[in-house]
Image (tube, rainbow, N blue to C red):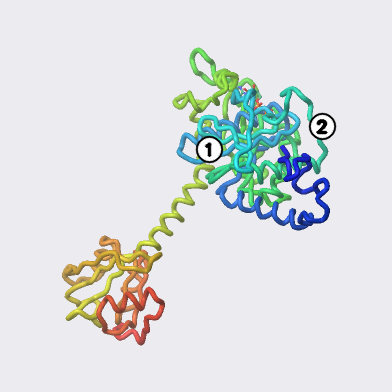
Amino acid sequence: MTEKNECGCGKSTGETPCGSGNKQPPDHFNNWLHEQQLQERLHRIRHKILVMSGKGGVGKSTVAANLAISLSLSGKRVGLLDVDIHGPSIPKMLHLDAANVHMKDGAIQPVIHAGVKVMSVGFLLKDRDDAVIWRGPMKASVIKQFLTDVDWGDLDYLIIDSPPGTGDEPLSVVQLAEPVDGAVVVTTPQDVATTDVRKSIKFCKQLQLPVLGVVENMSGFVCPKCGEVTDIFKTGGGEKMASEMKVPFLGRIPIDPAVGQACDAGTPFVYHHSRTETAKAFERVIAPILALSAHDETVQQNQKEEIAMKIAIPIAEGKLAMHFGHCAEFALIDVDNTTKTITGQKRLTPPPHEPGVLPRWLHEQGVTVIIAGGMGSRAQALFAENGIKVTVGAPSEPPEALIAAYLAGTLQTGANVCDH
Ligand code: ADP
């Protein structure tokens, strides 16, 4: 899709418009601007995952759509980008054949389906059965436009369904959407015997794109009457091949008539069938991908802890006590690290002195930082194990003055007066 420029001549914004002389910015400026816009969009997408296959018809788009919906059902913000320019199947699979995209505030609005933001070249074709004949650079340019001009907003995951093989489309995605977190390679028991799927894995390795794992789809048949799984073809080849190629194996998904029926009905399988064996197989495939954002949450939690600090200071007569282990009282002070202000404070009497008691007690109080005059090295190690940061050698001053200096980065520390 090309947005009209100011003079409405229909040329792309990168071209020189009609009759505008040399008033327009030069091409290199426009290129720079587009690059900035691309980076801004990509910056708001946490994880980008490419779904690939060696051959067509192995269920790659089915896996991509079910993966996107599963992540969305798990509460993640998800986009699904279909870059299969010659045979976009996502619109059909999601019953979005009649969907039209529109522009808002200069950006292409994705179509929202089951909570997932969807974009496909299929939305832009007048006749969905039109054959698209595009050369490599044009494909790269349309993929760039999908990444730059589509209003993806903030996403936890962008799932990118690429056409089978190792052609221009997956290459453009890896180069343009850098860094892509990794690829999921879909295969079938029959496909695994061919060299196509190995080529996909080698392609990823050459581009230093991590292979998140191999999925063996259509692996066994689920009887629609009794639910029993029968291996029609020799299964397990995907796992063997993954191990030979030293990439993870994500699991097997059987041929289940309900998968095809759900696709025909426009709502991917996992949306309706959360308790069947096939749904559980999809869940297993998705687990390592969900783990990517579980890691994000740990990082966020750590960041949150850095924002809200609880600082402990041993006190005697209203000032920092030099003998940490035997002090009669602790000041516990809550600090908002972003505004550098004290948000609350209390004084507490510690439990009777015994080895190991104070680290445990202060950890239970939620303390993240200790400001002390002196402290033995063993105690310092115990606090470190409890995730508490210790500053020693602070002067004997009132806690508020110490906190102010600590937050301003001007706290003067001397010798550790109690290093035993
Ligand atoms: P690809 O993207 O690899 O070309 P598709 O995802 O379009 O393949 O799947 C091809 C056909 O196979 C579709 O009709 C789809 O519904 C069906 N299909 C895919 N996986 C399964 C499965 N596990 N069980 C039953 N049908 C499936």
Q: Is residue 108 left or right of residue 327?
A: right
Which of the 4 image quarters holds residue 372? bottom left
Q: Is residue 9 visible?
A: yes
Q: Position of residue 181 (x, y in %)?
A: 61, 48
Give the Cα separation between the discs numbered 1 and 2: 34 Å
Report the image quarter containing ligand 1.
Answer: top right
Q: Position of residue 142 (x, y in %)?
A: 73, 40
144 vs 202, nearest the viewer: 144
Question: Is 280 situated above or below 23?
Answer: above
**Disc nearer the start of the sequence (1/2):** 2
**Residue for point 32% across, 75% down:** 403
Which residue type carries mark 2?
Ile
Which residue corresponds to mark 2? Answer: 133
**Residue for point 82% across, 56% down:** 22
Q: Position of residue 413 (x, y in %)?
A: 36, 84
Quarter of the image that includes the N terminus = top right
Which residue type carries mark 1?
Ile
Q: Is residue 199 visible?
A: no
